[in-house]
Amino acid sequence: MTFLTLLLQAAATGGGLMQLIFPVAIGLVLYFFMIRPQQRKTTEAKAFRESLVKGTRVVTIGGLHGLLVEVGPETVLLEVERGQRLRFDRTAIARVAGTSAAPDSPAPAAS
């Protein structure tokens, strides 16, 4: 009987608010450090793919470098070498050629 009394006294001391705050705090941390940055990255990638124009030198996610010769709503036509043309999905374009994969990396010093 004393164990049940102790449990009832512990619940009556106000620990219920602390039990509610902790999961909410964990949820906020997960949102601001994991979910929100991923949403921002997805939005930036979508804006980049929509801004592709004919004549841009790009690199695909597989590392293939080429020149955009045709840009459609879902696909792009890439000229890679001596007239060789390959069709890719827009989602396969990783970046514009000549830009680094990590935009925060410092530029090499000129000597």
Image (tube, helix red, strand yellow):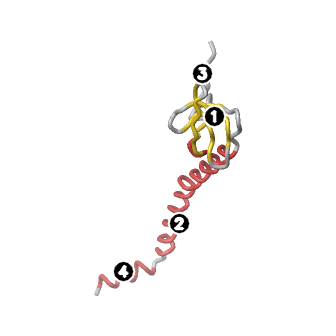
Q: Which amino acid does label 3 sit on?
A: Pro
Tags 2 and 4 in contact by the CB under 8 Å rule? no
Relative depth, front residue between 19 and 96: 96
Tags 1 and 4 in contact by the CB under 8 Å rule? no
Q: How far apart are marks 2 and 4 (CA)?
A: 24 Å
* Label ID, residue 7: 4
Q: Residue 101 occupies which quadrant of the picture?
A: top right
Question: How far across and how far down the image is residue 10, in percent?
Answer: 40, 78
Crowd band around label 2 with a 10 angstrom C-alpha radius: few (<14), some (14–19), many (20+): few
Q: Nearer the viewer, mark 2 or mark 1?
A: 1
Where does label 1 land, which residue? 96
Relative depth, front residue between 33 and 42: 42
Q: Identify the secondary structure beneath mark 1.
A: strand
Where does label 2 land, which residue? 24
Q: Which amino acid does label 2 sit on?
A: Val
Q: Distance between the residues labelled 3 and 1?
A: 18 Å
Crowd band around label 4 with a 10 angstrom C-alpha radius: few (<14), some (14–19), many (20+): few
Q: Which of marks 3 and 2 is nearer the N terminus?
A: 2
* Label ID, residue 108: 3
Q: Which of marks 3 and 4 is nearer the N terminus?
A: 4
Q: What residue type is labelled 4?
A: Leu
Question: How far across and how far down the image is residue 105, in percent?
Answer: 58, 31
In the image, residue 100 above or below residue 75: above
Q: How far apart are marks 2 and 1 (CA)?
A: 41 Å
Q: What residue type is labelled 1?
A: Val
Question: How far across and how far down the image is residue 53, in percent?
Answer: 71, 39
Residue shown at 59% from the left, 24% from the top:
82
Q: Distance between the residues labelled 3 and 4?
A: 65 Å
Relative depth, front residue between 14 and 33: 33
Q: Distance between the residues labelled 1 and 4?
A: 63 Å
